[in-house]
């Protein structure tokens, strides 16, 4: 298994910007995800690694080998495309065998390896089926088998679940993760779905507008977002404008308007955030971090919207000039209605500080 | 070993630098441009050059002045335009009318009629014209039949001259309207009409405001096409002896040795054709109306009144007869003994000799063999050019792409007569494009003419298959380690094969039935099938002529059937993957 290193990779298309200054080191055997909204440059970055695009600037390394200008067919990568890109005129066997035939393996060896790959993705007995006779999920597994059978150094997955329905997506997600753990293969996964990214990845690279926003483990990204974009893109978050009022060694107190003051932990802040008194700042408060009743950082407000989903109770609460999304786990207590007043508090740990620029 | 390595490295990097360059694509497409330059642009230029010199060889517009001041020329131009306009109108009425009847109403005989509506497309152009003259010409079967029934001194009616041409045009060209209008009608979502009704519109308003506007793109496109083909028509005027049309005038100028005038007439006709081609391309690239809904249930109203059913039944029977008669008469006469059918209504004695001769007499087999050989050579050229041009156009971006697209279509838009004149101007003396050989009078000029006339066929069909294929399929092959050549051979080629095959078959039968350019270019040793038919007709060997005709028709029908199947297959796999 190889590691992948992108060194200041920039890819522009004519005047349009593709990605800029991508600098990342993906470790051998790691499950690494590029996460971001569509058009953020995640697929472009993946295609630079696959060799379909040559970077305009910067270099690409597999282990210590510079592969920046290497043709895609020399890179020994396995790639699963969003639309699977199966060869429509070939059977399941022929599709999976393609990469082995390119490598001029003997007939027996090919047979044995294809059979093993079929077993791996649970498609035994399907070898003579035409691609058009398979369901979406089965096509997906053929694509996976075809990419894995060549024993690639790196596995690239480009939104492989986006064409599947919800139930199948769940199943296939677990399947892919199982295969990755079993084979220990370096895997780069592209998705715009944060749940997929959180559930599967060792580390995630969040991208927006062609630039890296944050690289980190799922917990780091969720609990310690680097900026406004990451905080609101990953999970739900209330972003509240505030002014720094008082800073101690461990705590920061801010004013969120109308004389309401909140206090949080100083360590609970985006990296390099500079707390200066009177400075404008942003708070990120997750809906599930807010508690009902009185406590530290008490707020009172009225309910604008009330939503009961079974597992949760969601409220939109107006407090001062702010509207807060809050979420409580349903414990059987009474659900409040629009117009009711409510008392909330935010534990110190539930407040996260961000700088005002995005 | 060390030395070879040292030499190899810089060489490779030069090759790499070259292939990675943005301009490398121009190296790849330059052979395509060279072919177009040699066999499309250069011949056109030579004809043009010939038209702008006077008798002494100095540059002048004398020929054009002479063209526009000679009454015969002006009459030819006027007749060609008149025939084309009337053909557009008659074809539109028949084609759109039939499209509506067959797609919107249920009546006795509908199914048979809708299968046979495309029969005219299976008729080779020369055979279509010949069959009409057998059926309705001045010594044709029907005029003589009525003469006999009513004991007349002379035939009561006969197709001749301009109106004969127009009738043949209507019969052979209405399918263009029928096909495009049928597609448009099938695409008309009934719910749109229902929506209009629910908003309070009556039948007439719906027609005026909904149906006609939605059919307009199909009708305009077909009109441009039919006008262009009518202007280029040569066989029908030839058959009905109408010398005062542009194509005939060109051929006549050539036979009279007035090459400058032939070049002038060709240039003028080319300008008209190219103008229409550009107009058509422009019109098709505009956004067309399209229904948003996907699955559309076509509903046919049933004609209930017994009287109406009775009348439509008879009318569709007559329609079926009219559609089948040309093929029937050609088949009938192919069994007639040559020289024995003179004043009788239909031939009196029959024989199988013509078919036996076809395969036993080397003189009769000659034209068949020639056509097979020449078409094969032309088609091989078409495949090589068409596949690579299609690949380059779909996969690469380069300057001059639109220009190249139009250049490939130009020879298709040009009348066959003009293509022949252009090739004669270019290759009656050696030049670099013919490797310094005189091609006129040799075997090679015929396949070259076929190659040029069929240029778009393989190209267009391959292009369509390629556009259906997702880019990522080729990338998948590459990521699995395949080189470009390997993935082209194992992945791209098999996927686009149905398209290539469809285009190839069409090009092949078009070569086998080509007449218009052949008649100006053939030499005694390269008589093709259609010229063979014409020569036999000329020497009153109708039987053999028609046996040739039946052979051509059967080949066309086989190809159309195979193509229908190929189309079905690609659609299936395309739909399943899409």
Image: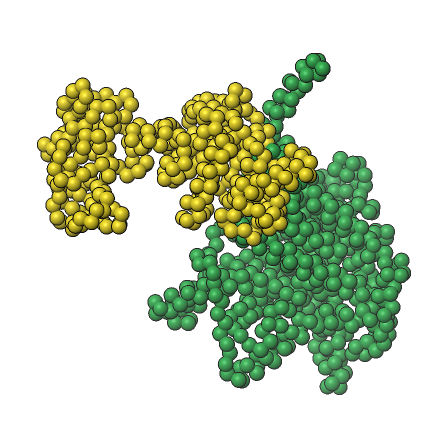
Residue B97 visible in the current orientation:
no
Is residue B539 left or right of A10 when viewed as pictured?
right
In this rendered view, identify the residue nearer to me: B60 or A7.
A7
Residue A99: name its quadrant.
top right
Residue B473 placement, left or right of A82:
right
Q: Quadrant of the C terminus of chain A?
A: top left
Name of the residue lying farthest toward the top = B3
What letter labels the chain drawn in yellow? A
Position of B81 with respect to A208 (left or right) is right
Q: Position of residue B236 (x, y in %)?
A: 70, 63
Q: Give coordinates of residue B467: x percent, y percent.
A: 56, 46
Residue B387: give x, y in percent of width and height. 66, 43
Residue at the spot x=80%, y=43% of the render?
B439
Q: Colour of chain B?
A: green
Q: Examine the rendered structure and indicate whether residue A83 appears above or below residue B73.
A: above
Q: From the viewer's perspective, is A264 left or right of A67?
A: left
Q: Vertical placement of B142 versus B163: above or below? A: below
Q: Is residue A203 above or below residue A175?
A: above
Is residue A345 at all visible to an observer of this figure? yes
Give the residue displayed 23% in from the left and 50% down from the top.
A308
Query: Residue A278: x percent and y percent?
Result: 15, 23
């Amino acid at each position: 298994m190889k590691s992948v290193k992108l060194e200041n990779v920039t890819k522009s298309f004519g005047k349009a910007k593709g990605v800029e200054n991508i600098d990342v080191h993906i470790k051998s055997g790691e499950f690494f995800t590029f996460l971001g909204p569509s058009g953020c440059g995640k697929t472009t970055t993946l295609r630079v690694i696959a060799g379909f695009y040559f970077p305009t600037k910067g270099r690409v390394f597999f282990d210590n080998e510079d592969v920046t200008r290497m043709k895609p067919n020399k890179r020994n990568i396995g790639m699963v495309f969003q639309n699977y890109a199966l060869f429509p005129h070939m059977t399941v066997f022929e599709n999976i065998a393609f990469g082995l035939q390119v490598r001029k393996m003997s007939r027996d060896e090919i047979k044995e390896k294809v059979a093993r790959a079929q077993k791996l993705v649970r498609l035994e007995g399907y070898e003579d089926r035409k691609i058009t006779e398979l369901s979406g999920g089965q096509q997906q597994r053929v694509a996976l088998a075809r990419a894995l059978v060549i024993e690639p150094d790196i596995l690239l997955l480009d939104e492989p679940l986006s064409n599947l329905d919800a139930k199948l997506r769940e199943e296939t997600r677990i399947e892919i993760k199982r295969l990755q753990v079993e084979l220990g293969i370096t895997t780069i996964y592209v998705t715009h779905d944060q749940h997929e990214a959180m559930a599967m990845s060792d580390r995630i690279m969040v991208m927006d507008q062609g630039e890296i926003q944050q690289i980190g483990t799922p917990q780091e990204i969720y609990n310690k977002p680097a900026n406004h974009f990451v905080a609101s893109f990953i999970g739900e978050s209330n972003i509240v404008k505030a002014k720094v009022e008082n800073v101690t060694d461990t705590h920061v107190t801010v004013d969120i308007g109308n004389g309401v003051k909140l206090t949080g932990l100083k360590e609970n802040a985006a990296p390099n955030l500079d707390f200066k008194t009177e400075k404008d700042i942003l708070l990120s408060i997750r809906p599930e971090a807010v508690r009902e009743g009185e406590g530290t950082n008490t707020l009172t407000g009225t309910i604008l919207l009330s939503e009961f989903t079974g597992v949760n109770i969601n409220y939109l609460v107006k407090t001062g000039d702010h509207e807060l999304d809050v979420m409580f786990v349903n414990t059987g207590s009474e659900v409040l209605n629009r117009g009711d007043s409510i008392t909330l508090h935010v534990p110190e740990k539930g407040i996260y500080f961000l700088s005002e620029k995005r | 070993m060390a030395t070879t390595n040292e030499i190899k490295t810089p060489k490779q990097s030069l090759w790499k630098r070259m292939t990675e360059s943005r301009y490398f694509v121009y190296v790849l497409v330059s052979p395509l441009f060279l072919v177009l330059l040699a066999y499309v642009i250069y011949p056109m230029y030579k004809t043009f050059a010939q038209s702008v010199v006077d008798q002494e060889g100095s540059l002048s517009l004398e020929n054009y002045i002479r063209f526009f001041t000679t009454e015969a020329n002006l009459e030819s131009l006027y007749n060609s335009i008149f025939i084309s306009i009337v053909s557009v109108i008659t074809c539109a009425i028949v084609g759109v009318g039939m499209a509506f009847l067959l797609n919107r109403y249920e009546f006795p005989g509908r199914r048979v009629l809708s299968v046979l509506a495309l029969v005219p497309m299976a008729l080779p152009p020369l055979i279509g014209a010949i069959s009409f003259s057998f059926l309705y010409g001045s010594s044709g079967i029907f005029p003589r039949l009525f003469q006999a029934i009513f004991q007349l001194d002379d035939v009561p009616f006969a197709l001749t001259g301009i109106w004969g041409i127009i009738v043949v045009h209507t019969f052979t060209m209405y399918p263009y309207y029928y096909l495009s209008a049928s597609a448009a009608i099938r695409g008309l979502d009934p719910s749109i009409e229902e929506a209009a009704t629910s908003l309070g519109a009556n039948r007439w308003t719906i027609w005026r405001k909904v149906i006609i506007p939605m059919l307009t793109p199909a009708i305009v496109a077909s009109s441009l096409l039919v006008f262009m083909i009518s202007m280029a028509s040569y066989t029908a005027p030839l058959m009905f002896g109408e010398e005062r049309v542009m194509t005939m005038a060109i051929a006549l100028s050539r036979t009279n040795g007035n090459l400058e005038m032939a070049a002038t007439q060709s240039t003028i006709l080319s300008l008209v054709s190219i103008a229409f081609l550009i107009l058509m391309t422009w019109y098709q690239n505009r956004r067309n109306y399209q229904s948003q809904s996907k699955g559309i249930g076509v509903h046919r109203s049933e004609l209930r009144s017994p009287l109406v059913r009775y009348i439509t039944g008879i009318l569709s029977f007559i329609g079926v007869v009219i559609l089948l008669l040309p093929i029937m008469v050609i088949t009938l006469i192919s069994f007639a003994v040559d020289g024995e059918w003179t004043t009788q209504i239909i031939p009196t004695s029959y024989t199988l000799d013509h078919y036996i001769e076809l395969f036993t007499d080397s003189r009769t087999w000659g034209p068949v063999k020639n056509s097979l050989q020449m078409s094969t050579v032309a088609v091989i050229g078409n495949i090589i050019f068409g596949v690579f041009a299609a690949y380059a156009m779909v996969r690469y971006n380069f300057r001059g792409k639109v220009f190249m697209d139009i250049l490939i279509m130009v020879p298709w838009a040009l009348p066959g007569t003009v293509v022949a004149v252009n090739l004669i101007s270019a290759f009656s003396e050696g030049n670099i494009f013919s490797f310094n050989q005189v091609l006129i009078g040799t075997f090679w000029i015929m396949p070259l003419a076929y190659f040029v006339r069929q240029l778009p066929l393989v190209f267009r069909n391959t292009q369509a298959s390629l556009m259906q294929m997702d880019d990522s399929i080729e990338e998948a092959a590459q990521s699995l380690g395949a080189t470009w050549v390997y993935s082209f051979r194992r992945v791209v080629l098999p996927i686009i094969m149905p398209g290539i095959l469809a285009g190839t078959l069409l090009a092949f039968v078009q070569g086998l039935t080509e007449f218009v350019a052949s008649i100006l270019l053939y030499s005694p040793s390269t008589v093709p099938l259609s010229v063979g038919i014409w020569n036999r007709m000329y020497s009153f060997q109708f039987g053999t002529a028609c046996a040739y005709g039946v052979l051509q028709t059967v080949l066309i029908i086989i190809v159309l059937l195979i193509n229908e199947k190929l189309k079905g297959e690609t659609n299936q796999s395309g739909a399943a993957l899409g």
